[in-house]
Image (cartoon, rainbow, N blue to C red):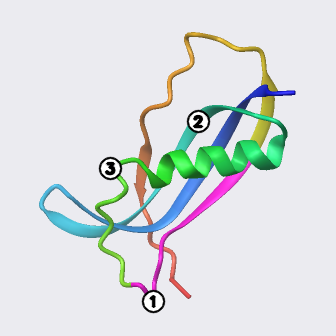
């Protein structure tokens, strides 16, 4: 049975050009998806981010890819007020592997 889910996500090591200079950013965001279970909800939310043009402009080398982690995945009651948009960016000063 398909359920509605709220998926909290964090991205790290995203080299992006914002304000005319390339810097390493991280971000937090939330996505609302329909899926059969939490694992499929996570996959659907991550896929939404991969398809977002804002994040497709990453400048990372192939040897230093960005990562996306799912945090909280909660089944919710559908709400038309839920919007799949926006990011809270921060400067990512962590060391890459």
CA separation in Å, label 1 and label 2:
28 Å
Residue in the image at 36% along x and 84% along y: 61
Q: Where is residue 23 in the image (x, y as percent from the top left)?
A: 29, 69
| Towards the viewer: 39 or 83 | 39
Quadrant holding the N terminus = top right
Q: Earlier in the sequence, mark 3 or mark 2?
A: 2
Q: What kind of element bears circle 3? A: loop
Provide residue 58's location: percent of width, then percent of height: 33, 66
Residue 56 against residue 13 in the figure, above or below: above
Mark 3 to mark 1: distance in Å? 21 Å
Residue ID for mark 3: 54
Looking at this rendering, what residue extends furthest in the front direction?
1
Stretch in magenta: 62-71
The residue that label 2 is drawn on is 31
Mark 3 and mark 1 lie on one chain; the one further toward the N terminus is 3
In three-dimensional space, the C-alpha distance between marks 3 and 2, rounded to whole angstroms, equals 15 Å
Front residue of 62 and 14: 62
| Residue that label 1 marks | 63
Regarding mark 1 in the picture, which secondary structure is present there?
A: loop
Residue that appears at 51% across and 83% down = 96
Residue drawn at x 82%, y 43% is 38
Magenta run includes residue 37:
no
Q: How crowded is mark 1: few (under 14 residues within 10 Å), some or many (20 or more)?
A: few
User: Mark 2 Cα within 10 Å, few/some/many (few <14, many 20+)?
Assistant: many
| Mark found first going from the N terminus, 1 or 2 | 2
Label 2: element kind: strand
**In the image, residue 72 lies at what x, y percent?**
76, 43
Q: Nearer the viewer, residue 95 or 43?
A: 43
| Residue appearing at x 68%, y 51% in the figure | 43
Q: Does the magenta stretch include residue 63?
A: yes
């Amino acid at each position: 049975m398909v359920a509605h889910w709220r998926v909290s996500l964090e991205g790290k090591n995203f080299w992006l050009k914002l304000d005319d200079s390339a810097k390493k950013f991280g971000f937090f965001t939330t996505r609302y998806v329909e899926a059969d279970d939490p694992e499929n909800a996570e996959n659907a939310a991550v896929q939404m981010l991969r398809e977002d043009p804002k994040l497709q402009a990453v400048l990372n080398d192939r040897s230093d890819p960005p990562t996306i982690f799912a945090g909280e995945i909660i089944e919710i009651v559908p709400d038309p007020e839920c919007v799949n948009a926006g990011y809270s960016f921060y400067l990512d000063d962590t060391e890459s592997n």
